[in-house]
Image (spheres, grey):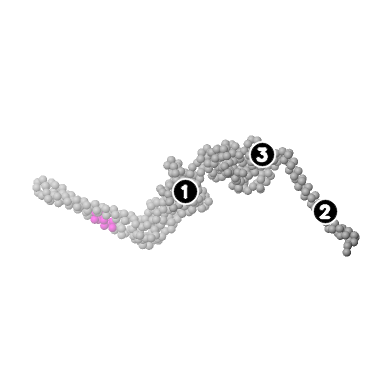
């Protein structure tokens, strides 16, 4: 059974009404987006056909000629040049302590007193024995003198004369022994007065008046430590031995600076180098000395050490971010007088404190690009908007195109990280 013509016409009209919104939406989308893409394409084509691309905003710094000190860093330990544990040399009761803990004592100052009465008696006894033997020696010498006269008249025999001579020698030996005994007793008596062997700061005392002190006690009476001047012991890799020893041999002692626990920086000189290398660590120990009048460097404290191992003289110096690393080595971009850049291969000697020393490739006074390097190529047109590193203050550089240099600089900074190392990349 066939459908009627009116039914077929109705179905076609219904499909047309369903497709109409889709066709309208497609036409509207083409009108909005298609015309926009065509406009951008036409604008780009017009820009390419109309002239050169816009100049790239950069920061550039002039290379300088100067000296670059090479510093080596290490972790060091503060060590006193002298530290003495004061121990008794005689035994007895401690009568007095003549110092305060933490005070500075002078060399030769009395620190404590041991009961001297027993040692004084020993000295008096030794002196008495000496006086007795000296009297016997004097009598024997007088008899010897008479025998030497009587031998000529044969009133005494030669044997008696020799015996008298031997007696004199015997008393001479006894007197010499007594004199040594007196000196020993005097030394023992002197040891009862305990004196400071060096000038320094007295530590915590370990005995009190009334205690009996003995030889061989585990704890000293007190420890005296010299704080001014003071030293710092630190280690460096053994490859620097020849460089450091060469400067010490020449009498040019390298400068050393340390940062103490209080944040203060102290300057001194390298004093000595160890006589052997530590084979386990491949390092060698060094000692630097420092003036320490205020006691800021305290024994056994850890400090950061910086040693100027050598000074590179008359080098072309540029900021470290200017030197880039490519497939063929290091290079920089130099700004020419016509505000274009050229790529130069350079020889890097050393880098220290964000400064690089170059031996070839750049002359002093030439401006090198330090920011915006990632957008450059050989011969690119540039616009210098800053004469300092990113993050540093600088005088604004006039924009030759008449734009706002400050706003352009801020925009570039927002696009690029402030880290100097972030701009380094390989050559394309």
Q: Which one is earlier in the sequence, the residue at label 2 or at label 3? A: 2
Tag nearer the camera, 2 or 1: 2
Whether the residues at callouts 2 and 3 have beta carbons within 8 Å, the answer is no
Q: Main secondary structure of the magenta part?
A: helix
- Pointer 2: what residue? 24
Give the residue furthest to the front.
1
Quarter the C terminus occupies: top right
Whether the residues at callouts 1 and 3 have beta carbons within 8 Å, the answer is no
Task: Name the residue rendered at 66%, 39% in the picture.
Answer: 381
List x then y, in percent, for residue 180. 27, 53
Task: Name the residue rendered at 47%, 51% in the picture.
Answer: 76
Which residue range is magenta in the image? 122-130
Q: Is residue 124 magenta?
A: yes
- Pointer 3: what residue? 381
Q: From the viewer's side, name the closer residue of 373 and 23.
A: 23
- Pointer 1: what residue? 237
Q: Is residue 12 magenta?
A: no
């Amino acid at each position: 059974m066939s459908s009627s013509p009116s039914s077929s016409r109705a179905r076609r009209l219904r499909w047309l009404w369903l497709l109409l919104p889709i066709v309208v939406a497609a036409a509207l989308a083409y009108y909005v987006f298609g015309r926009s893409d065509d406009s951008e394409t036409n604008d780009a084509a017009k820009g390419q056909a109309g002239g050169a691309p816009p100049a790239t905003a950069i920061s550039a710094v002039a290379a300088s000629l100067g000296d670059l000190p090479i510093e080596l860093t290490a972790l060091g330990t503060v060590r006193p040049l002298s530290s003495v544990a004061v121990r008794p040399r005689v035994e007895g009761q401690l009568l007095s302590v003549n110092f305060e803990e933490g005070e500075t004592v002078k060399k030769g100052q009395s620190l404590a007193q041991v009961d001297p009465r027993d040692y004084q008696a020993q000295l008096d006894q030794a002196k008495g024995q000496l006086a007795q033997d000296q009297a016997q020696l004097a009598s024997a010498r007088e008899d010897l003198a008479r025998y030497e006269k009587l031998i000529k008249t044969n009133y005494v025999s030669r044997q008696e004369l020799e015996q008298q001579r031997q007696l004199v020698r015997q008393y001479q030996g006894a007197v010499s022994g007594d004199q040594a005994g007196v000196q020993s007793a005097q030394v023992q008596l002197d040891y009862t007065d305990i004196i400071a062997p060096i000038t320094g700061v007295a530590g915590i005392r370990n005995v009190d008046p009334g205690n009996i002190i003995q030889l061989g006690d585990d704890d000293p009476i007190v420890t005296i430590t010299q704080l001014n001047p003071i030293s710092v012991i630190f280690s460096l890799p053994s490859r620097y031995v020849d460089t450091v020893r060469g400067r010490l041999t020449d009498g040019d002692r390298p400068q050393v600076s340390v940062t103490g626990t209080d944040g203060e920086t102290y300057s001194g000189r390298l004093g000595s180098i160890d006589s052997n290398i530590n084979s386990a660590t491949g390092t060698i120990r060094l000692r630097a000395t420092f003036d320490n009048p205020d006691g800021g460097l305290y024994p056994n404290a850890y400090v950061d050490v910086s040693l100027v191992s050598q000074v590179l003289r008359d080098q072309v110096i540029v900021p470290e971010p200017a030197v880039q690393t490519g497939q063929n080595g290091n290079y920089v971009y130099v700004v020419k007088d016509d505000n274009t850049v050229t790529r130069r291969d350079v020889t890097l000697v050393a880098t220290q404190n964000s400064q690089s020393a170059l031996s070839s490739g750049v002359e002093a006074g030439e401006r090198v690009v330090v920011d915006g390097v990632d957008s450059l190529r050989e011969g690119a047109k540039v616009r210098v908007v800053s004469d300092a590193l990113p993050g540093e203050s600088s005088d604004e550089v006039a924009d030759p195109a008449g734009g706002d240099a400050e706003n352009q600089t801020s925009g570039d900074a927002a696009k690029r990280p402030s880290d100097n190392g972030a701009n380094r990349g390989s050559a394309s």
